[in-house]
Image (tube, helix red, strand yellow):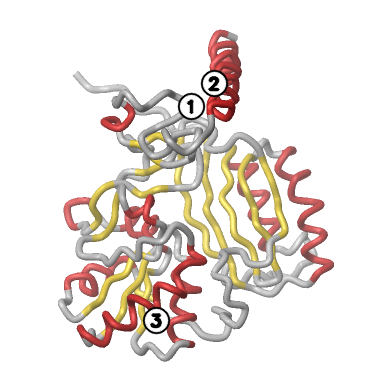
Amino acid sequence: MSSRPQAPSRFQVAAFYAFTPLEPHTLELLLEELPVLAAQGHVLGSVLLAPEGVNGTISGPEEGVGSLLQRLRCHLDLGEAHFERFQVKYSRCDRQAFRRFKARRKKEIVTLGVPSVDPRARVGTYVSPSDWNAVVDDPDTLLIDTRNRYEVAIGSFEGAVDPGTDSFREFPEWVEKELRPLVERRAPARIAMFCTGGIRCEKASSFLMQKGFPEIHHLQGGILSYLEQIPESASRWRGECFVFDQRVALNHQLQPGQHRLCHACGLPLTPEQRGLESYIPGVQCLHCQDRFSDQDRERFRERQRQWEQQHTTAHCS
């Protein structure tokens, strides 16, 4: 007896970035026009804009997502294909990955806190997903996960060094305190780095080259491109990949995994962690049970009650 074909997921998710100069007037136009275009296309998500470029993730009907990306590519329909390094990774989901749309001005599209670093001027060697296993398997490679500690905790490549940072801004300090002595001890033939979509690695590789580290490589398109292109049977990836939206984490098929967010502190939780006595949905988890005041938790409880009421009403309508 044949099974019925699975219906396609309703929403397309696009994660994208580009290091490319944005003039002030263009940045202002984008901040004004993108929310309008998103509303017209029923698109939700987040777009960060800075003089160095654009970084975002959006979710919605395929036509709406495509229209917004095309507007970015064409520079507000001015006929200038300015985003020449526009990197986009697609996936799909059954429900909206975001709760709202926002376009925001930032100093950096990914915050390293070192203004002199410019991936447009100098960047490490890109390694395609198809060549990544050979780099990872080479014992002369020093493999570094440039993501935050809570991202690393739910999945990473075998043998990768975890800097243990809480934000990307801490990476430069870790380089001087930990990475430089490590490189001196191990004398690797190369340093290879990876992140979710590639943006942090571009900045990190540019920073390391500025600091005199030789042979810097990074995974082109990040973990998402690797999971998309490499069969699970040949994969060196272990666990799930954290994403900054309501899906929380993706498995090797780029489908939502088992992790869920604590909506009090925003950290990902396994099914086992959600089963602990310390976990109260929307109020606290093992990571934050001692972090908030009673007044905060009461506020979280009210927010959770409102969300549950809205969710029940939407489900029944």
Residue 149 placement (x, y as % from top left): 37, 55
* Residue at horizontal 36 percent and vertical 35 percent from the top: 286
Amino acid type of the residue that numbered disc 3 sits on in the rendered structure: Thr
Residue 260 placement (x, y as % from top left): 40, 34
Q: Is residue 137 above or below residue 182?
A: above
Quadrant hosting residue 160: bottom left
Q: Is residue 219 above or below residue 30?
A: below
Please, what secondary structure does the residue beneath circle 1 have?
loop
* Residue at horizontal 21 percent and vertical 59 percent from the top: 236
Q: Residues within 10 Å of mark 2 (few under 14, many from 20)?
A: some
Amino acid type of the residue that numbered disc 1 sits on in the rendered structure: Val
Say which label, 3 or 1, has the lower sequence index: 3
Q: Using residue 306 as the reference point, say whether residue 91 is left or right of it.
A: left
Q: Residues within 10 Å of mark 1 (few under 14, many from 20)?
A: many
Q: Which residue is mark 1?
A: 283
User: Marks 2 and 1: in contact by CB < 8 Å?
Assistant: yes
Q: Which mark is residue 112?
A: none
Q: Which residue is mark 3?
A: 125
In-front residue for pair 283/231: 283
Q: CA distance from mark 1 to mark 2?
A: 6 Å
Q: Which residue is mark 2?
A: 301
Amino acid type of the residue that numbered disc 2 sits on in the rendered structure: Arg
* Residue at horizontal 18 percent and vertical 57 percent from the top: 234
User: Marks 1 and 3: in contact by CB < 8 Å?
Assistant: no
Q: Using residue 98 as the reference point, say whether residue 216 is left or right of it.
A: left
